[in-house]
Amino acid sequence: MSTARVPRTIILSDLHLGRPGGAGRARAFEALVGDCDRVIVNGDVAELHHARYQRDAERELDIFRDLCTSRGIRLDLVAGNHDPFVSDVRAIELADGAVYITHGDAFHPAIAPWSPYASTMREAFDRAFGARDASAREDTARFLAAREAAIAEWRTMGAGAHISTLPNMLLRPHRMAAVLAYWAAYPRLAADWATRFSPRAGTVVVGHSHRAFSRTVGARRVVNTGAYGFPGTPHAVVVEDGAVRLHRIVPRGPLYALASQPRDSWPIAEATDARMREGSGRPSTPPMNRAAPTIAPRSSDVS
């Protein structure tokens, strides 16, 4: 068990503020975040890379920031593939590394294998990762390659804005098959990533795939907070008092709230604790700093 105290922390992801089918108005989160000491949005907080939605996304993100800062709530934004310049943070560890949080777009070189721009993203990822500094840590290099892949997607997309919907999935069965294959592989991808880059983490919190789940994979609990909009159901992870809880997020009037009962809950524990209960008792290595180096957006990269 981890003995590190964690203030009441809520982890959300994939709000996609500013675009149709996303979370809608930032003020709808007022009650949800108001009861927390810390809010972590684990990627894709707003649709900042689509020229069509960027203005609305920036406005709603400013409102969301104010909801937290005006109440003295710490807000951490983890960058994802739809908001790669929202911060330089690509992963966060809590409880001395027992809880690891990252969006999940860097797990696969195509970023979103079901996307019509998947091949473009894979080429950009492979090119950036292949050109990495030999002295750079591998996780940092992969995070930076994922950022370059996201940039390549919106350069190719131009002023257009691709959003997955059920009708366009049904018209392209190969894309639906790619989604299902990715969903099946995703818990293992997350667990394998943590094994390499955050070996103490007994809990791994991800987003990106838009499918909420809680799975035990080897010595780790992998949990996905889903998404606002097709095909996801929004969830939140709450970390406090030595425990992790996964709650569905439900509407209560114009506001979002946590479902009264968690969908799942478990104690905060390092991966080694779980292994010892299983009888292997392999030691862990110290956790590592997760912030990627600062990369300022180029004028040609943002609209």
Image (cartoon, rainbow, N blue to C red):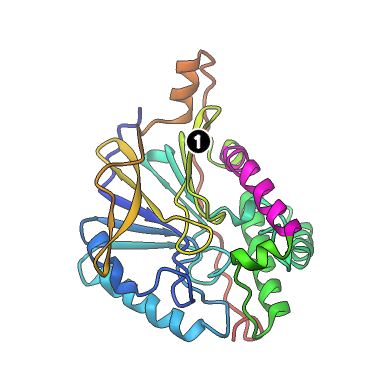
- Does the rendering let one see residue 222? no
Which of 5/23 is in front? Answer: 23
Q: Secondary structure beneath disc 1?
A: strand
Q: Residue 185's image quarter? A: top right
Please give the name of the residue rendered at 60% of the width and 71% of the height, measured from the top-left corner. 163
Give, as a three-letter code, the residue at label 1.
Arg
Screen quadrant of the C terminus: bottom right
> Residue 216, image x and y in percent?
50, 31
131 sits left or right of 192 in the view:
right
Which of 122/6 is in front? Answer: 122
> Residue 253, image x and y in percent?
24, 67
Please give the name of the residue rendered at 54% of the width and 63% of the height, measured from the top-left corner. 80
- Does the rendering let one see residue 22? yes
- Up the image or down, 193 lies above or below 209; here it is above
- Residue that numbered label 1 is attached to: 215
Please give the name of the residue rendered at 38% of the width and 78% of the height, measured from the top-left corner. 60
Question: What segment is highlighted magenta in the picture?
Answer: 173-194
> Residue 26, image x and y in percent?
34, 73
